[in-house]
Amino acid sequence: MRARQDTHMGMLEAMAGRVAGGAAVEFRPSGSSMVPLIRDRQAVLVAPVDPARLEVGDIVLARVAGTVYLHLVSAVDPARRRVQISSNRGRVNGWTSHDRVFGICVAVDGVPRATASRKVRPVRPPGPAGSP
């Protein structure tokens, strides 16, 4: 899912920063690009990921060409350490390197995503409320 407005874009940027810092985050992205896997404003839990373990069909929080998306891995290229990111509606966003894949969606509305948990990097314990 991509942000529809600058405020949502900022939210995805902020979530990417927190996940890159080692935290698992829960948030409610806006948009319809991932329906029916993720519907507008459903709660998603995203945790840091080991990009080398990604497979086609995983949902990741990643930066592609300067924009942060919560989209599908549509192809993997282990030799070049990169993945292709696409919406669930067939729109290809492009290839991005492993260092621009921040996290993997491990649950949607509390329902675990199959195989996602085995791709998570160790998570930093949550800090006090309101901390990054």
Image: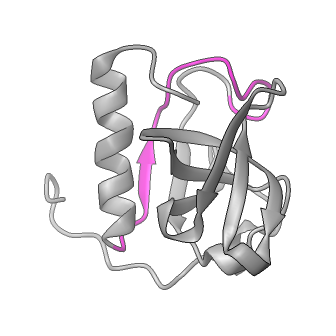
* Residue 29 lies in the magenta-colored region: yes
Q: In which quarter of the image is the N terminus?
A: top right
Please tell me in which quadrant of the rendered image residue 20 appears.
bottom left
**Extreme-bottom residue of the structure:** 122
**Left or right: residue 116 compared with residue 3:** right
Residue 127 is situated, as x and y percent measured from the top left of the image, at 20, 69
Residue span colored magenta: 22-38
Residue 91 is situated, as x and y percent measured from the top left of the image, at 76, 26
Q: What residue is drawn where x is 69% and y is 79%? A: 52
Query: How many numbered markers are drawn?
Result: 0
**Extreme-front residue of the structure:** 80
Vertical placement of 27 versus 8: above or below?
below
Vertical placement of 98 versus 39: above or below?
below
Residue 51 is situated, as x and y percent measured from the top left of the image, at 63, 73
Magenta segment's dominant SS is loop
Residue 57 is situated, as x and y percent measured from the top left of the image, at 84, 52
Please tell me in which quadrant of the rendered image residue 22 appears.
bottom left
Please tell me in which quadrant of the rendered image residue 13 appears.
top left
- For the rendered model, the colour scheme is one colour
Q: What residue is drawn where x is 74% and y is 69%? A: 54
**Left or right: residue 46 compared with residue 93:** left
Vertical placement of 70 versus 100: above or below?
above
Q: Nearer the viewer, residue 34 or 123?
A: 34
Vertical placement of 125 versus 29: above or below?
below
Q: What residue is drawn where x is 76% and y is 24%? A: 35
Q: What residue is drawn where x is 67% and y is 42%? A: 94
Q: In which quarter of the image is the C terminus?
A: bottom left
Q: Which of 21 and 98 is in front in this view?
A: 98
